[in-house]
Amino acid sequence: MAKKAGEDYKIASIRERVEQEILVLQAGKVTNGEKLTVEETLVELEKKGTFSEIDLEQEEGVTDGCIIKIGYDENGNAYIEEINKDNKTRLVITKDPKGYTNESVKIGIAVNASDKKIKDIELPEGMTKREDDLYEIAKNGQYHIKATLEDGEVIEKTIKINTMDKLPPKVFEIKATLKDGKIEIEGTTEDTEADGENACSGIERYEYYVNDTKYNTQPIEGLEGDRYNVYVVAYDKAGNHISSSVKQLGPVLLYNGENKLPTSVFSFEHAGYIYWDIKNGTMGINDIPTGFVDGMTQPTFR
């Protein structure tokens, strides 16, 4: 009787803890007018370490010797549908890292019963054993693991790895403006689409650079000097990154190519190859891919 009461109390405590974590996840979705899905719940709670492993097909997560089944309530929100003690001998798979990565995934394999030990493991193609008793997977995909225990029992488990993203975000351009001593930057990008070997992890953050000094936010103020090279580096959630084109900001002297004397001073934004036409005293902006034409001179920074 006392043992059962203790088990019931443990299960109730686990339920309460996981329910609170689900509510936190739901709150983040409500802000954007979205609903939390069962798959998102399982994946996010595994990332946090709440679930030691998850089964997306069965919609279950394992924690502290219990199996928790996640379902949808009458309002379409994810919730705990069922929680039971984990009495089944099963393989416990741990992944490092649990989230997105641009490197191989390390796998730990154990059995959930303390009185049972693994005698032999039959590895699928694409999974290799490391010297530190871990295993390594280099490509996304499904992997079926078969283990034989010392007592002869055979247990199997199929795991899905879909967190490897080795592709950088898409190439992108930015627009930078200098006004009243403050640089404002416009321009974002998207992560490269998933393919047969790579997931699409999504953009995580941007870093802003002025003369190779990093800023995590913008607009950027309090700058020294009067000439600036501006660019942005975009990172996806797997750690891949790409730099935007470089924009040059600052005062520019325009020369006519003959007497080398300045004719005017402009606040000039350099984007690609831009030249000013000063032939016959007229001035206009011309976007030229390469080379010069008659009557065109390249602006020079002061």
Image (tube, grey):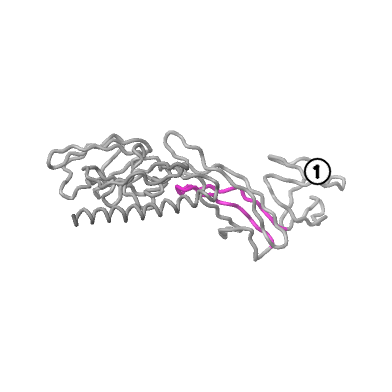
Left or right: where 225 falls relative to 140: right
Left or right: where 2 falls relative to 189: left
Depth check: give the residue in front, 90 or 1.
1
Q: Residue at x 47, y 48 (%)?
A: 237
Highlighted magenta segment, given as a residue range: 226-250
Residue 255 appears at what percent x and percent y? 79, 53
Depth check: give the residue in front, 192 or 270.
192
Depth check: give the residue in front, 166 or 300.
166
- Circle 1 is placed at which residue position? 295
Q: Quadrant of the N terminus?
A: bottom left
Residue 14 appears at what percent x and percent y? 32, 54
Residue 272 appears at what percent x and percent y? 67, 45
Most frequent secondary structure within the magenta stretch: strand
Helix, strand or loop under label 1: loop
With respect to residue 123, does 244 lie above or below? below
Residue type at the position of mark 1: Gly
Is residue 233 in the magenta section? yes
Quarter-wise, where is residue 224 in the image? bottom right
Q: Residue at x 47, y 47 (%)?
A: 240
